[in-house]
Image (cartoon, rainbow, N blue to C red):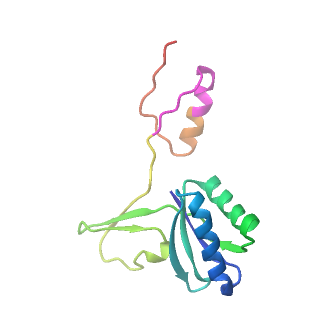
Amino acid sequence: MVFSGVYPADGSDFEALNSAIERLICNDASVSVTKESSTALGLGFRCGFLGLLHMDVFHQRLEQEHGAHVISTVPTVPYTFEFSDGSKLQVQNPAALPSNPKNKITCWEPTVLATIIIPSEYVGPVITLCSNHRGKQLKYTFIDR
């Protein structure tokens, strides 16, 4: 999931935004919503979406169907930090990471194990595309007709 903060452009519109989000999630159960506050933006929501397109459509529906003017934070994904003492911390907001950890940190980011089925003439460009985006080819198989 991709997470983004959604805040009302005018802080006094929090209740209207709350109502609009509640109505939208009735039709879209795949959105996860939790209330959060920011020192710079005030009260808002941390929303989880299935991807960037899903997030964009949700924001457009907020504006077009409910007239909500929102400020959105940069979309992020959750990272897991593992410390040398064995403890783990899942962070969705970089501000939640300890600024001066006493233990060594290992960072784990979300990955996807995918199967890509394409015609043989596109194999080269798709492998190039994947490797340019840190993809690793684990297996290569031809499907017989």
For the record, the magenta segment spans 114-126
- The image quarter containing residue 4 is bottom right
Q: Look at the image and say whether residue 33 sits in the magenta stretch.
A: no
Side (left or right) of 10 relative to 126: right
Task: Check the image and name the residue furthest to the left.
Answer: 85
Q: Is residue 67 left or right of residue 11?
A: right
Looking at the image, which residue is at 58% across and 20% down? 120
Q: Is residue 100 above or below residue 85?
A: below
Q: Position of residue 119 (x, y in %)?
A: 60, 22
Q: Is residue 120 magenta?
A: yes
Asked if residue 67 lies left or right of residue 101, the reply is right
In the rendered image, residue 116, in percent from the top left (x then y), is placed at 52, 32
Using the image as rendered, state which of residue 77 and residue 32 is in the foreground. Answer: 32
Q: Is residue 4 above or below residue 124?
A: below
Depth check: give the residue in front, 22 or 78: 22
Residue at 50% x, 61% y is 77
On the image, the x and y values in percent for residue 137 come to 46, 34
| Nearest to the observer: residue 130 or residue 72 | 72
Counting the numbered discs, the total is: 0
Instruction: Relative to 8, say whether 82 is above or below.
Output: above
Q: Quadrant of residue 89?
A: bottom left
Q: Position of residue 48 (x, y in %)?
A: 53, 62
The residue under the point 68% across, 74% down is 71
Q: Give me the residue at 62% from left, 74% from top.
A: 19
